[in-house]
Amino acid sequence: MERLRGVIIITAIALYMVFAWWFFAIGQVISNGNWDIAGSYLADWVSYEIRPDIEYDGDALDVSFPRFSPLGSDPRPEWLTTETAMVERRVAASAAAGNATGGATSGAGFLGSLDAEPAKKEEGGFLGAMAPSSTTVESPATETETAPQAPATTREEAVVSADISFGGDTHIRVQPGFVTVTHRGETLELDIEERVSVNARGPLPEWASQRAPGAKVIVRFGFAGRAEIEDDEVKVRRRFIGWENFFFDTRSPYWDMSAGEVLGTIFFGDRIEADRSNLSLAWNNFVNNADWQHGDVWLKLLQTIVMAFAGTVLASMLAFPLAFAAARNIMPNRVVNQVLKRFFDFLRSVDMLIWALFFTRAFGPGPLAGISAIFFTDTGTFGKLYSEALENIDDKQREGVRSVGAAPASVQRYGVVPQVLPVFLSQALYFWESNTRSATIIGAVGAGGIGLKLWEAMRTNQDWENVAYMVILILLVVFVFDNISNILRQRLIGRQP
């Protein structure tokens, strides 16, 4: 057995891994994973998309951008070119008639049509009809039937062709009823029957897909983007590296300026607003950036730090005296020992996230719920760690202090505390750094801090660059606090960093 011990251990581990692979169906999960979506999510962390939509409108095209486009209210990107021409468009008869009247208000409201003259009062009351009066005069019929009018046509200049470049030889050319896609030296031609079907001329290349004949065609160009060609429009997703409008949003006067132009305007330009300097305006526009919300993100990050610090400090302050009562060598009463130890088990057995959910319902969303969750969980953890540290102290120091006639409180103060205080502080510093990460998680359930902000950005399923921004901030804070905690712990235990 001694000779075969290594082989037995390796075999047992291998068998367990095979069992885990089968039990959790890992192979099936990997094979069914949608890796294209995962790749898109990762790309969204370091890039952004411009999303023009090209709709078919008879013999013309309608090119539009989302309301809050990264390119501003009047986007004209160089990679999207259009051609215009005079085309005939059909106008509904009612619209043409309305234009012919010179814009006169129609005699109708949201309750129905209005008569040109007040309606005649009905000759009757609530008791029944009354006999006709001799002065009643019947008015001739004024209603006339109008013949249906054919739709009118107008000639106007409109977009008849749009060309979208994705870099290199990749581009899409959209025309009424026809779309051409070129990629990797291959050309895909699609006939569009408006609001009916999309039909390819020939087999689809590997970078294009269509679920069913006549359905929309999706073309993918890797990191450069993709497009969805439907029977009523073409949805383009053009991707660019970087974070769009990180410093100034489209409403800022500094938007779309280069770094040199921004600095020149701040220090040498005329005042943009009379009541504040250009530097103050630039800082205000940066902090209150509508797309990135830097000020709110920093405030939530500060809340997370304060939550971790306050919860850790309060927990260590409460656990410190309770640990003395829970330690068997300090408190001889076994009932008190067991009650406190089971109390610590209860506090730490309920996960911090569960405590956060409970206190969020009790106090409402906010930092107070997060502080309470950290306080309850860490009180149980500190109580257990502190009491075990007290039970492992060297009794010789305590006996030495007691031998000189010191009071019981002095015995604990000079015989016990100096031994365990560096350990207590070191553990508290470690949990302070750890709780900074934990406060981010519990914030996602409404306990305040940057975790809630992070969860809101992830729920949109589009703002992954904002997620990356907040994750980087959290990593920086954890890195700084981890180094501070390490330096302080090394000094506490007597080693220089």
Image (cartoon, rainbow, N blue to C red):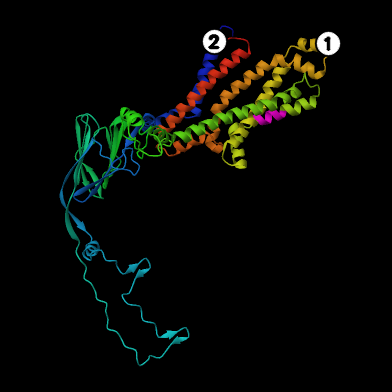
Q: Which mark is on residue 260?
A: none
Residue 29 visible: no
Q: Nearer the viewer, mark 1 or mark 2?
A: 1
Q: Residue at x 20, y 30 (%)?
A: 169
Q: Height in image: 179 above or below 127? A: above
- Judging by the rendered image, the residue that carries numbered circle 1 is 403
Q: Position of residue 420 (x, y in %)?
A: 69, 16
Amino acid at dot 2:
Gly
Q: Position of residue 487 (x, y in %)?
A: 56, 15
Position of the N terminus by quadrant:
top right
Q: Residue at x 24, y 74 (%)?
A: 145
Q: Residue furthest right?
A: 405
Answer left or right for 75 relative to 315: left
Q: Residue at x 34, y 91 (%)?
A: 135
Q: Give the distance between the C-alpha atoms of the residues marked 1 and 2, in whole angstroms.
A: 54 Å
Q: Earlier in the sequence, mark 1 or mark 2?
A: 2
The residue tagged with tag 2: helix, strand or loop?
Answer: helix
The local crowd at label 1, few if under 14, some if 14 to 19, many if 20 or more residues have their Cα within 10 Å, is: few
Which residues, given as a range, are shown in magenta?
342-348
The local crowd at label 2, few if under 14, some if 14 to 19, many if 20 or more residues have their Cα within 10 Å, is: few
In-front residue for pair 122/74: 74
- Inspect the magenta stretch and tell me whether residue 420 lies in it: no
- Judging by the rendered image, the residue that carries numbered circle 2 is 6
